Each structure stands twice: as C-alpha cells, then as structure tokens.
Amino acid sequence: MIIFGATELGCLIATEFFEDHDITIIDKEENFTNNFSKLDIGFVTGNASNIDVLKRADIKEADLFLACSELDEVNIVACLTAKRISGVRTVCFVSKEEYKSSLGLTKDTDYPCDLYIDEVIWPEELLTQDIFRIITVSEALDVENFANGKARMLEYRIKDNSVLVDKKIKDCDFPEETLIAGITRNAELSVPTGDTVLEKDDKVIFMGSSYSLDKLAGRFFHEKGLTKTVTIIGGGNVGKMLAESLEDVKLKVKVIERDSERCEKIAQDLSDTLIINGDGTDLSLLNEEEISDSDVVVSVTNNDEKNLLCSLLAKQLGVKRVISRVTKNVNVPLFEKVGIDIAVSTKNAALNEVKNSISGGNVDILATVEQGKGEILEIIVPENYADTMIKNLKMPVKAIVSIIQRKNKIIIPNAYKLVRLCYNFIIFIT
C-alpha cells in the first residue's frame, strides 16, 4: 500500500494497517512527524504526482494507492498518474463537493474512460451521514444500519435513573431479537456475558432487528420522545448538508452562522431552515434564540476550540443532547471527558471508509465503534464450511456473532443457532 500525504489522516491509516500491510509514505521530508517514526513503514520523499517519485515507491508492486495530502488537486493528479503507469487501485480524498461529483466517473459509467479514480472519498459527507443517523435516533450515541435496514446497531449510555442500573443482562427484559454486543466502561471495550452487571455511565452497544431495537429504544431510552428540533452551529459544508437532510425528514432546524455572505448563500438552498447570522459562542445570542428548547444542538465549525466552547455553553443552558465535531482525533477523549455527549471525527469517518476499501474476499468491515477499539465484520461463510453451533465456534479473539442473514431473513442468534453454508453473518469483535 502506498499513501501519499504525511497528514494526520495519513498517519491514522498507516497506524491502522502497518502491522498487516507493507506501507510506503510519500511526501516532503519536512512533513514526516515523530508519529511516523514509531511505525515500521517505508518513506519516499517527493510529490506523488511525479512519475519518478512513484517509481521509487515501487508503484507497480502496490495493490492500493491512497492520496490524502492537504491539496485536492494534487491528490487527483497523483491518483490519475498512479493509475496510468501501474493500473493500481486508487483512492482519492477531497474536501470539495464538486470534486466528489465530477470524479465519480469510473470505467462502468455512461462516460467510460481509460483514466479514472476507483474511489473518491469526501470525509465531510461521511461525517454528515454519521451525525444524521445519530440525531434521528433519540438519545443514541451511535447508529449503524445493516442488511438494507433490516438490522441495526444502537449505542446508548446507561443513565443513573435507568431501570437497567445494577441489573444482570440476563435479568433485563429486553425485546426478543436484541442482544448486547459490547460494553464500554472506564474507556475499556469488552464483550459481556449474561451475568455481566450493567452500571451507571456504561456505554452499551445493542444489535438486533430494526423492529426490536425500536421497541428497546421506546422502552428504556427515549425519555423525551422523538427528536423534533435541532440547532446547528456552523453553516459550512457539514452544517448545510446536515440541515438539508433534516429538512427532508421534517425536523425543525435552525442554523447559526457567523459569516453573513455564507448565510445568504445557504439560505437559497434551505427553504425550511431558519438561518441566523451570529456567533455560536455568544451566550446572549443563544439565550435570545432559545437554544435551550432544542432537542439537539450540533456544533460543526472547522475549529475544535470553538466547537468545544459552543457545546459547553449549550450544555450550560440545559440542552440535553449535544453533538460536537472534532477535527483532531487526539481531542475526542477530551470532549467526552468534559461532558460533551457525542464527539464525532471527520478523520474517523474517513478511516472507516478506507477499511471498507481494503477489506475484501469473504470479510468486510461494516463499521467500527469506540474510536476503532471494536469492529463489526461481515463474514460470508464459505461453501466447504460444516454446520456448526455458534457456541462451538472457535474464535481467535474475543467476539460475538450478533446477526445472521440467510437470503432475505435476519436471525438474531443465540449459542445454539447453526452457522450454515454460504450465509452472511455479522461479528462484533474487540
């Protein structure tokens, strides 16, 4: 694998995959930080849009080329150059919507061409999708959909007034077709058993059929009912896209944006959203706009410090659910530690997409949880696999089979269910 760009994202990708892949980083020498020196990877100095630099990196021997430098145009040229001289699979990161749209051409489209980029990733779009899923499921910390929406993963925090506190899992009256796949306690993720006792502040990962999880949410977690009003601080790409998605599901949305020109621009596309020209860190403005009445406040500016301050002000004003964007991954634990309900990272969203690109064969990474501490894998059972009860599966690591898909049927398994030939099943693994 060759990664062009010694950026924070490049470092995250290299750190995630260097143990199982031969990785070479291409960039200017001054961009190689100490974080890279801890990894057993190769380095080539230069610009990956240069053919000679790509040859020095042995581009013809690579099976994947990722371009994640800070400049979109350089990433695009580097991917096209790598594709032309080697035919390697290319993944290009961009920061502008127009590039995502125009570069979405592949050899299978209506406009076939010899030079194309296999996959174009716009991290802000992925982050928007993550936030949207979380907002539309009241109280959830994380949401993922599987099997065309027939199965889901929901993560909730156990609050001090919950009837689940101090109960063993086997004694909880959870709906059928529901199981707990993981628990995060004191920043440690583990796979529980029926005798595990739930505690206050546990973050619990439920998996099951969509219908059963809807029943679970209504019974144990939706204290205030459905989300109806959302305030978004920051009218950039993420804020605008999020508002458009929330308009589509008929939520009442307001956007607070500091730049007056940007306010005018997004107002043209957001017909049902209230656009407020102001500073999200202005306490008097937040009071005047009655932000405390919002079911959810989302701060999605490009500045971590501002997002943190806006989020803390919202919490101080009594907002029950606050979601904050984090641009530097190292800040995620800090945001959660000071009381922000949900901290979401653009780079984590991008890393998850890369994992999906790299996985192949009979195994796909569908999602990660708790900043990569756990993964949700989809495994296709091979044709020569003998029928085996789940309790008799020999897992190489701590894991749980949480969903089995047989044709169009979703099965939430127990230890006595059989894993049969040629069926998909989803494993939560730590």
Image (cartoon, rainbow, N blue to C red):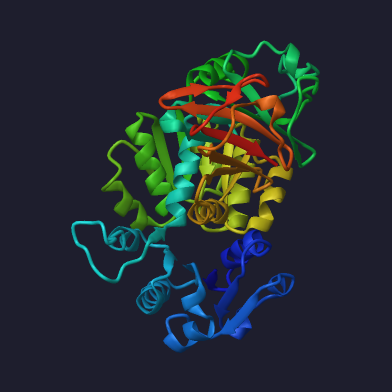
Q: Quadrant of the image for the C terminus?
A: top right
Between 113 and 284, the one nearer to me in the picture: 113
User: Is 340 above or below relative to 179?
Assistant: below
User: Is 28 above or below relative to 93?
Assistant: below
Residue lying farthest to the left in this orientation: 110
Between 341 and 70, the one nearer to me in the picture: 70
**x then y, percent, for residue 252:** 39, 31
- Residue 255 shown left or right of residue 168 in the figure: left
**x then y, percent, for residue 2:** 53, 72
- Residue 408 shown left or right of residue 172 in the figure: left
Residue drawn at point x = 54 percent, y = 39 percent? 378
- Residue 62 shown left or right of residue 192 in the figure: left
User: Is 128 above or below relative to 214?
Assistant: below
**x then y, percent, for residue 416:** 66, 19
Between 8 and 171, the one nearer to me in the picture: 171
Q: Looking at the image, how many numbered discs can be counted on the residues? A: 0
Residue drawn at point x = 46 percent, y = 89 percent? 52
Q: Is residue 277 visible?
A: no
Residue 51: name its quadrant.
Answer: bottom left
Q: Is residue 260 visible?
A: yes
**x then y, percent, for residue 347:** 56, 56
Q: Quadrant of the image for the N terminus?
A: bottom right
Residue drawn at point x = 55 percent, y = 48 percent? 282
